[in-house]
Image (cartoon, rainbow, N blue to C red):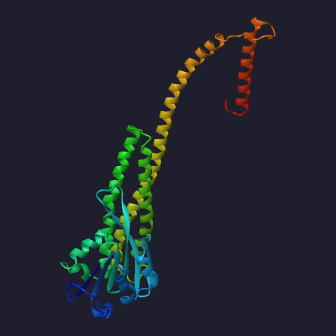
Amino acid sequence: MTTVFVHRDGRTEQATSIDRAWLDPAAGVFLWVDLAAPSIPESLILSDTFVFHRLSVDDAMSAIQYPKVEAYVGYLYIVLHGIDYREDRKGFRTNDVDFFLGPNYLVTVHDGRARSIAELRDHCPRNPRILGEGPVALFHRIVDSMVDHYRPEVDKLEQRLDELEKAIFSQPDPKLIRRILDEKRQVALLRRILTPQRDVIGRLARRDFVEITTSMSFHFRDVYDHVVRLADDAMIFQDRITGMLDAHLSNVSNRLNEVMKVLTVVATIFMPLTLLTGMFGMNLNLPHFPGGEAAQFWWLFGGMMAVVVTMLVMFRRKRWI
């Protein structure tokens, strides 16, 4: 679905098509084109109407791209990730949003699940200030909203880690290992997305590109601070989940040791009983045995002791005891 907003003469209107004259900065208009799950004909807007570079168009139409920012002639190509939120699913997944930022236009490409863009798209016709402040300001609004949507999901992740930490020490069940590994995968995904995203927004805050003015760089610096805090939280979560995994394995090992201790005590109690019943229950009647029938018991007893001594010597040489 293609949505086109044009701001001119202090008003923002939704248009049905794109006039090529609007792409000229001298036209005095601001343009926002949103492509939600674009079809092949709709994607031609990128290559035919705006004449974007082929590599950036290919990246925008691909399913997954990691956060990055690239400067092309006349525009910036930025890829950022937003939270893909669903009520019926624990954890989170991200969806990438592609931005083409020009001097007087902003083109957004996504799969239709971008909440930040949907919210601004609904308010844009009623609030001319959203697009009237320029495409860079609109881009900042979208990015700021995307980063804000991370915080509730990160807080939910932290709450799940707290509950999991309590369960490890109160109910050390071996089945908890699956939950721990699931949360570890979520934390790894969070770090893998936030780290490059932090670098991208950091470049926007440092004014590495002429499209970002000094005043707008201050706004991006505020967003950068939020992303840094989220990245720090993700690093702390990584350390916590590693400690929780070690603690869980230690608890399971300690429980196993306790069970083995009880079994060892039981086995130790019955060992002398088994020895006594075995030795005195032997039916010895071996013909031609040295010493006669009376010495057979002691010959067998000496052989048993020799086996024990041989095994102890072997264990000692192998440093098992």
161, 129: nearer the viewer: 161
237 w.r.t. 25: above or below: above
> How many marks are shown on the rendered structure?
0
Q: Is residue 212 visible?
A: no
Classify residue 128 as left or right of residue 104.
left
| Percent x, y of residue 119 | 25, 71
Classify residue 148 as left or right of residue 237.
left
248, 54: nearer the viewer: 54
Residue 227 placement: quadrant: bottom left
| Percent x, y of residue 267 | 56, 22
175 w.r.t. 59: above or below: above
Q: Is residue 88 visible?
A: yes
301, 124: nearer the viewer: 301
Please tell me which residue is depicted at 38% across the width and 37% down the height of the picture.
Answer: 170
For the N terminus, give its image quadrant: bottom left
Please tell me which residue is depicted at 36% across the width and 59% down the height of the picture.
Answer: 92
| Percent x, y of residue 309 | 73, 22
101 w.r.t. 219: above or below: below
Classify residue 219 as left or right of residue 283.
left
For the C terminus, give its image quadrant: top right
Residue 30 placement: quadrant: bottom left
The residue most toward the left is 126
Residue 97 placement: quadrant: bottom left
192 w.r.t. 282: above or below: below
| Percent x, y of residue 53 | 44, 85
